Amino acid sequence: MGKYLLKRLVMMVITLFLIALLTFVLMHAVPGGPFTSDKQVSKAVLDALNEKYKLNDPLWKQFLDYMGGLLRLDLGPSFKYQGKTVNDFISNGLPYSARLGAVTLVFVLLSSIPMGIVSALKNGKWQDMLVMALATIGVTIPSFVIATGLIYVFSFKLGWTPMYGVDKWQGYILPMIALGGYSVSFLARLMRSSLLDVMGQDYIRTARAKGISETRVVVKHALRNALIPVVTVLGPTVANLLTGSFVIEKIFAIPGMGGYFVNSVTQRDYTTILGMTVFYAAFLIAMVFIVDLFYCLIDPRIKYE
Amino acid sequence: MKKFLCLMLCVLLAFAGLAAASAEAPVQEIVYALANEPDGIDPGVTNNSFASPILNNVFEGLVDYSSADGSLIPGEAESWEISDDGLTYTFTLREGLKWSDGSDHTAADYVYAMKRILDPNTEAKYVDFLLGYIVGAEEYYADNSIDFDTVGVKAPDDRTFVMTLKAPAPYWIDILAMWTFSPVQQATVEANGERWTATADAYVSNGPFRMAEINMGESFVLEKNPYYYDADQVKLEKITFRFISDLGTSLMAYESNEIDGMDQIPTTDMARLKAEDAGVVVTPSYGTVWYDFNCAKAPFDNVLVRKAFCLAVDRTAIIEDVVQTEADPAYSFMSPGYVLDGEDLMDAASDNDLSEEADVEAAQAALAEAGYPDGEGFPEITLSYYSNETVGKVVEAMARQLQDNLNISIKISNADWAVYYDDILAGNFDIGAMGWSGDYLHPMTFLALFRTGDVNNQVMYSNAEYDALVDQAANMTDAAEAFEVMRQAEAIAAAEYPVLPLYYKANTKLMHNNVQGYFVTPSNDLLLKTAYVAE
């Protein structure tokens, strides 16, 4: 097990390095630079800026400098926002994104798994139809449409929830539904098909033949196996939810990380693009790793050597 | 019966209003939505127009625009004198000026602010306005080891600030209204470095308001500055500038009274909001929306081709149907707005044969005269623009009009601003979406754009006679004489169509009718010094 963990950790570092390298190369390959703004600055100013941010150095040196900073967990200054660092964007935006993400995750888990189970156990009955109809809506309608619709009805027309921001706890409700809608639907469908699949297995028939109660069959024997595919996609889903969604944050005016990340690309804010990408990648890789460890707990047949 | 009901309702409403009025005075706090977060709020550094609502209300320079008729009035300087040769400006500051933290604020702070801008490490984006005008500034910027005494900014005593210019510039006072020339407090800048703008405590200012809270990505909260020299005039206690980038969300918040105003109006809602008298505020802007011609490259090196294009565009259709905004059609690059002795520079300007609607016959005639009868043999040209929804719609409409009216073929291309603008600067375009909003309220901000070799002369227009007139006007000390010379210069360039003028910008914003007493300058600066919430 120890050897396996070490191997995984090395792999993770290499993956991150490659992601950083690839992002760095792509970003510099795209035309346009960080200091093109709506008003042209003179050459003297541009020279001073390039000098200060070391953009005159050869690319390999810029990359090495950046990696050096990365080892010290310093993601560098933003080229666009004066006096701000990429660490500022993350330390400031992540709590908002993560808080909303955590609430959404609880909402997703508490609704999708029961929905999937009910749907599978009542296969073909009206409960199944209802759940699948909801799930289809959730998967097909884009989150920004759901978000705008929710604000219009619950904030604008009914006045039950705040229009924007998360200053009050009620502010989390609509973004949670809009952000989690897709995941709820997706996981419910996955849970349903996975459980249906497991329920048809031989060992379930054996369990039933031994006279074990139906509840016990489902909870003890079927569910644990049926959860494996769900846990697999849970890793990326968690990373996704916690790091925030640009669209949802924009519509609800939540000061999370998403906005800075997306804007940094059009603004060619090199350090921000790189820093956020690396951060997001690290988060995603870590989540996938944790999920892999979870397999052992769920399925005793899986062992890591 | 309907009329009677209406009347009854009015009476009832009036009573309700009276009752509310006698109950309690309105809270002097407003929430104003901004669609974009500025890239910084350091007055010496940023040139980002998104910073305007903050900088123009927390800082004040020597002169100020918060007057009912939009004219320049004394700010922190109570008076000033200009030497006869037009080179030396001597400002006398008001007595007992204070920073927002209560400490004393003197003329030396102005000198420090200028010195800081002239340090390349400060990254001052508007440094050109010092380099181009102030004695010794260029030399000092190039080499900071030079003695700063060689630079023409001095503070002989606490209340006197002297600036010395390289050459006379009658519009220098107008330039000084820019936030770049605001003083900054040396103590906080030196103690906190670049991060003095990151926390409300460190962000010391000198204007009618001061920073109370900085919530990154979320809001700036301003409060009344008790140390402001004119604090008695300041009525608002608190202003929250909240960033809401989704206009749909901010509009719903506005219509349900959660916010008091917003700086952009979704174009599709404009007509409805106006009809409902929902607080659409339209103010003239010192800016023009135009399309750059590449005057250095065929076929647009031919003035007749440029003329044909200018004639073939239906401005009314674009303003009313496509942009759906409040604006006047433009026949010149120069926006009206500069007034001297009651006369606008553009009052007597020629329409350069252009009109509100397309003049197809004249356009075709000009194109034929240029050697392309009925568009024959005219190369396919590219109309480029930067990714923006409204601009995209305009470009589509314009391309259609040009194709139909001139019988030519047009390709459309679009890119991110960073890529697009690099192409424009490199002369890599035929026609490109552009425009200009005056940095300061003086025609020179427009005229300089078309001077041969100017850093902003992207259209590569060049006319020796024009250059001479602009240089002449720039160095004149007599405003009335300069006015005439600038008029001539405008007429020369506008008649050669260096750009395709579309419309003169108007600034639109939403503000509930009960917020009153604020000013919007032609540079679209919202000045809240004397604003208040009425009943």
Image (cartoon, coloured by chain):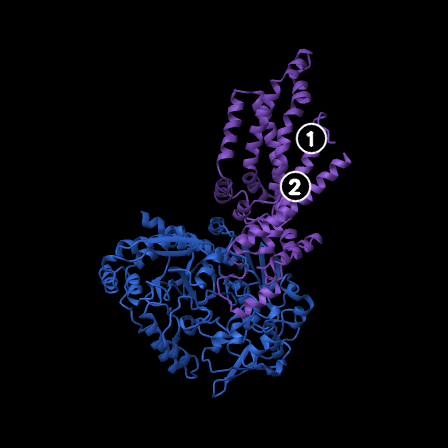
Disc marking residue B159: none
Of the residues shown, which amino acid type is indicated by label 1? Tyr
Disc 2: host chain: A
- Residue A295 numbered mark, or none: 1
Q: Is residue B122 visible?
A: yes
**Which badge, 2 or 1, is on the more N-terminal residue?**
2
Given residues A174 and B286, the one toward you in this image is B286
The chain coloured purple carries which letter? Answer: A
In percent of the image, x 32 and y 70: which residue is there?
Answer: B496
Vertical arrangement, residue B116 with respect to residue A276, above or below: below
Same chain letter for marks 2 and 1: yes
- Residue A263 at least partly seen: no
Left-right relation of A135 to A279: left
Look at the numbered disc 2 and give the secondary structure of its residue: helix
Which x, y percent locates residue A186? Answer: 55, 32
- Residue B3 vs B467, above or below: the answer is above
Contact (Cβ within 8 Å) of mark 2 with mark 1:
no
- Residue at the right extreme, as displayed: A2
In the figure, the blue chain has which letter?
Answer: B
x and y, in percent, of residue B79 in the image: 52, 81
Name the residue carrying label 2.
Answer: A285
Residue density around tag 2, few if under 14, some if 14–19, many if 20 or more, within 10 Å:
many
Residue A271 shown left or right of residue B503 in the figure: right
* Cα separation between marks 2 and 1: 16 Å
State the quadrant of the C terminus of chain A.
top right
Q: Position of residue A128 (x, y in %)?
A: 53, 23
Percent x, y of residue B198: 63, 61
User: For the residue labelled by badge 1, is the local secondary structure a helix, a strand or a loop?
Assistant: helix
**Amino acid at circle 2:** Ile
Q: Residue furthest bottom?
A: B84
Residue under the image location 42 percent in, 83 percent down:
B476
Tell me the quarter of the image containing the N terminus of chain A.
Answer: top right
